[in-house]
Amino acid sequence: MTKRSTLGWGTVGALGLLLIGLIVICNYALAGWQLDLTENHLYTLSSGTDRILKSIPEPIDLYFFYSRRAAENIPQLRAYGDHVENFLRELAARADGKIHLHIIDPRPYSVQEDRAAELGVSSAPLNAAGSKFYFGLAGTNSTNGHQAIPFFDPSKQRFLEYDVDKLIYRLVHPQKPVVAWYSSLPMTGGFNPQTEQVRQPWLVYSQARQLYDLHTLAPGATRIPAATRVLVLVDPHGLPAVTRFAIDQYALAGGHIVVFADPLAESAGGPGAAPQGTGPKFARLLASWGVHFNPNQVVADRSLALTVSGPSGAPSVDPLVIGLRRKQMSQKDVITAGLSNINLDAAGALSPIKGAGTNFKPLLWSSKDAEVVSRRSVAGTFDPSGLLTGFKPTGKRYVFAASVTGKVKTAFPGGPPKGIKLPPGTTALKASAKPLHLIVFADSDMLADFLWVHHLNLFGQPLEQAWASNGDVVLNALDNMAGSDDLISVRAKAGFTRPFTRVQALRRAAQTRYHAEQVKLQNELRQTERQLTLLQSRRNAKTTLILTPAQQREIQHFEHERLTIRKRLRAVQAGLVRSIDRLGTELKVINIIVVPGVFALAALLGAALRRRHRRAARQPAREHS
């Protein structure tokens, strides 16, 4: 017996040493390995992110300002903060030493707070006492360039990877991206011969000029400049064949293009000028990219129609002037997610062409209370509210903007048009050498100031106040397209916070069960309070301070009735809380008692089976001896 016990303990010791050795070896051999078992792969980096990290030429510094101590009492914010920190650590680990991560918990009135403000990281008030909460990221490169995410918005957690990747990309490429800009609309400003006054540039054009290196593309251009990162086409009306061919070749070479097509560009020219449209020739170019756009159709939407000034100056509902809300915007794309409202004027409709081979993702769309009308029937109409008479909705949602990616074919299968001379030794592309990245809007008037900007004058200084998100969606589109193909490919992930679906279902069921009774009690309460107010307002004819005995009894009766109804109403509301608490108790019992009990029982059963097998093995040996 003593010998067997000594041998058993020696075996246990040897196994323990072997286990420790394996753990040490695995810590070194498997460093950096991970297995993402989350449903939506929250911790798996996109392939585009890996390529961006590999393209970093020299080390950059990232400063994550996170008030960890202040977030201790806010579970959701603390959980998201930990998620951001783990994500940044993963990026630094995958960057082969090219990212130096600094995690800072700023203390009040410290140098760290000054550093955060210097790098562009802002704080949010945490409580009435004025405590500051920092939750942002800043980055610097070796040339004193810096970028910042002032504050990680929890509502945009789906785009965490994209936002951080964009910051890194801009640190690696600090120069302004070159944007080639063509517009047939008077958005660049200049002298207006009709009013004999200087015309200011449209605000969205001025903002883009501050953020990008804008180059104006001439109407008869035969090539797109080689350094162009994004090509912007605003109502490409009447473009000659040579320019359309240049655009076609730029698209086939993997270009990044933002198009504002329009069946009825009412912002063209000045007052009294006839509206123009993009036209069928450019529509054929869109068709070669897998996008169907009918320049002769305009979308009217009765549910989303805005009120405008009518012909006589009186307010009038115009179904062609459409105000989109969040329900009409894709919340899965970084270009439109989180925007509040976007206004359109006489917009067209977009749809994918079957068999085109491109990926068509809607960004903006109408309600189902919409129809398409002929461009000719509404052009020059002074009272569009007349469209509401005989309005016939189709029950279909029409797409106003879309993101299109993929390989396409040329719109000039017969070769270059006259006037094009290719460089020696080169041939025209017939199909995509690289995938095209296209964002197309079916409206150009959305860029005009009158649809989204109030021009104010504050003490003699001009001031612009945006009342819609038109400018934001344009700059988001440019921002997205100005990055690399790897940055554009970074996908939006599912939300980090997971809802308690079982609790939500229970709440909905309880609300349905108690709703009728709750409404009934609330109506009775309102009726009782009205009767009580009426009785209290009735006074004796001789004095306003004395009530008759009958009135006093009635008041006491209704006060008692009011208290009774309120108690019943609280009981109904408490029923919902009890149902949720009961579920919480059940979950606690399952997690704390049932699940460990099942594992303990399984372990005991396993141990009992092993003992039985050992006894069964020893019995024949004893009989044999």
Image (tube, rainbow, N blue to C red):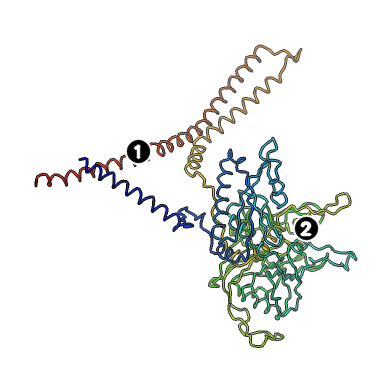
* Residue at x 55% of width, y 73% of height: 356
Figure quadrant of residue 453: bottom right
Judged left or right of residue 577, residue 146 is right
Comparing 5 with 404, the one in front is 5
Tell me where residue 307 appears, x and y as whole percent: 74, 53
Residue named by callout 1 = 597
Residue named by callout 2 = 450
Tell me where residue 459 appears, x and y as whole percent: 88, 49
Comparing 405 with 275, the one in front is 405
Judged left or right of residue 204, residue 333 is left
Q: Is residue 216 above or below residue 575?
A: below
Mark 1 closeness class: few <14, some 14–19, many ≥20 residues within 10 Å: few
Mark 2 closeness class: few <14, some 14–19, many ≥20 residues within 10 Å: few
Figure quadrant of residue 596: top left
- Count of marks, rendered view: 2
Q: Secondary structure at mark 2?
A: helix
Between circles 1 and 2, the one closer to the viewer is: 1
Q: Amino acid at mark 2?
A: Phe
Residue 407's disc is none
Q: Secondary structure at mark 1?
A: helix
Q: Amino acid at mark 1?
A: Gly
Tell me where residue 4 appears, x and y as whole percent: 22, 43
